[in-house]
Image (tube, rainbow, N blue to C red):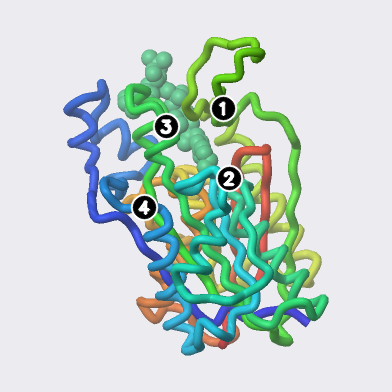
């Protein structure tokens, strides 16, 4: 038993921020951002809510799947932070789209959230505890980065991507791993105002050692893709598309070169959206799906890396 992805959707905020716009208030420029990351634009929340984006992506995926919301019996939302600390964003999405699914929860696995959510959904589907799962990845990094720190804020964007999974005979191969630790990439938690807590100095925003994450990303992508293919007696040549977490075009290209594959098998849209954390792969998948690029029985690999340090790679067969 496994699953098929039967529908995809996405939603991004309307406000597009170009590299040139960033250079008006940061010591940066289009040349640096483009050449080091490939990023040109990102969408940033103004008056939208993350619930709104997540629900729009979810509704688009349900519509693409050609099913009714009533068919969904499980909802997993991947997010670093919803509009509220509590309730979970998934509970709000369920209400907003009119779902009465009873297995509903959030996961917080950073940029790997999509692959970890697929693994969770696959486990429920295989165990017979769900038949049709909605996975929504919704992220608002613009609220978590320091907009005075040019080394991080230029990299990220906001958005949501969603997929509908249905139980099928297509067995998915998924590997997830974590190294633990926070030093190279973290976002501090809320300090609160407890009169007893010993206050610590420090930024409340995302902090990252970009070079270390870069090295971790390329080595884990290459190793984990090799593992999922070997476990299935496949080679890179058998795979139609490798959809990597969209963080940096150089990471995508280094990984592709190490795997000896042509550019067209590593589609990317990081130039349009920046790094939208866990939403990046489902947004890319939706772009490819809506462009009619995916054919039945295509083998597709998803591979992500991020805070945790976490990594996740998944091999699926495309088909409805
Ligand atoms: O989803 C997972 C999250 N994270 C990632 O995927 C990040 C992975 N890492 C990366 O993508 C890259 O390491 C970065 C894009 C973050 C940085 O690229 P880099 O080539 O590793 O640059 P660097 O950090 O070594 O910085 C090089 C220089 C520094 O100046 P000095 O010390 O050489 O004078 C930085 O201060 O570039 C400077 N710099 C900038 N200059 C203009 C850093 N940010 C900027 C900027 N504009 N926005």
Mark 2 residue's CB less than 8 Å from ligand 1? yes
Could you give the CA–CA distance between mark 1 and mark 2, rounded to whole angstroms? 13 Å
Q: Secondary structure at mark 4?
A: loop
Q: State yes or no: Cβ of the residue under disc 1 lies below 8 Å from any atom of ligand 1.
A: no
Of mark 4 and mark 1, the one earlier in the sequence is: 4
Give the alpha-carbon distance from disc 4 to disc 1, as whole Å: 22 Å
Closer to the eye: label 2 or 4: 4
- Mark nearer the viewer, 1 or 2: 1
Residue 22 sits above or below residue 258 on the image: above
Q: Position of residue 169 (x, y in %)?
A: 73, 87
The CA distance from mark 2 to mark 4 is: 19 Å
Report, in whole angstroms, how far the alpha carbon at label 3 lies from the one at label 2. 14 Å
Per the image, the residue denoted by label 3 is 145
Q: Which residue is mark 4?
A: 49
Location of mark 2 (residue): 110
Please give the name of the residue rendered at 61% of the width and 13% of the height, measured from the top-left corner. 195
- Say which of 131 and 267 sits in front: 131
The disc label shown at residue 51, or none: none
Q: Residues within 10 Å of mark 2 (few under 14, many from 20)?
A: many
Residue 226 visible: yes
The reply to whether the C-beta atoms of the residues labelled 4 and 1 are less than 8 Å apart is no
| Secondary structure at numbered mark 2 | helix
Q: Quadrant of the N terminus?
A: bottom right
Could you tell me which residue is drawn at 58 percent across and 29 percent down? 189
Q: Nearer the viewer, residue 273 or 69?
A: 69
Residue indicated by mark 1: 188
- Horizontally, residue 181 falls left or right of residue 213, namely right
Spot occupied by residue 94 in the image (x, y as percentages of width and height): 53, 68
Give the quarter of the figure containing the C terminus: bottom right
Nearest to N terminus: mark 3 or mark 4:
4
């Amino acid at each position: 038993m496994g699953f098929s992805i039967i529908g995809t959707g996405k939603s991004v905020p309307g406000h597009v921020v170009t590299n040139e716009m960033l250079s008006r208030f940061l010591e940066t420029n289009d040349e640096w951002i483009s050449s080091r990351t490939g990023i040109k634009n990102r969408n940033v929340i103004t008056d939208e809510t993350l619930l709104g984006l997540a629900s729009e992506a979810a509704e688009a995926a349900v519509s693409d799947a050609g099913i009714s919301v009533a068919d969904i019996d499980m909802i997993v939302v991947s997010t670093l932070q919803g509009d509220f600390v509590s309730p979970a964003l998934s509970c709000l999405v369920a209400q907003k789209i009119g779902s009465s699914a009873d297995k509903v929860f959030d996961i917080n696995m950073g940029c790997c959230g999509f692959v970890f959510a697929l693994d969770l959904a696959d486990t429920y589907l295989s165990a017979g505890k769900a038949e049709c799962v909605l996975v929504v990845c919704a992220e608002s990094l613009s609220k978590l980065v320091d907009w005075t720190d040019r080394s991080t804020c230029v990299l990220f964007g906001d958005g949501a991507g969603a997929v509908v999974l249905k139980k099928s005979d297509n067995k998915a191969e998924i590997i997830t791993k974590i190294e633990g630790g926070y030093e190279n990439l973290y976002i501090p938690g809320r300090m609160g105002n407890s009169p007893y807590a010993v206050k610590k100095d420090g930024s409340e925003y995302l902090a990252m050692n970009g070079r270390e994450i870069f090295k971790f990303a390329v080595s884990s992508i290459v190793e984990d893709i090799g593992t999922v293919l070997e476990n299935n007696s496949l080679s890179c040549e058998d795979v139609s598309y490798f959809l990597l977490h969209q963080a940096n075009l150089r990471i995508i290209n280094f990984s592709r070169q190490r795997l000896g594959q042509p550019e067209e098998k590593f589609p990317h849209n990081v130039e349009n959206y920046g790094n939208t954390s866990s939403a990046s792969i489902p947004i890319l998948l939706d772009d490819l799906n809506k462009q009619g690029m995916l054919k039945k029985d295509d083998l597709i690999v998803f591979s992500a890396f991020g805070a945790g340090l976490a990594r996740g790679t998944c091999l699926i067969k495309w088909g409805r």
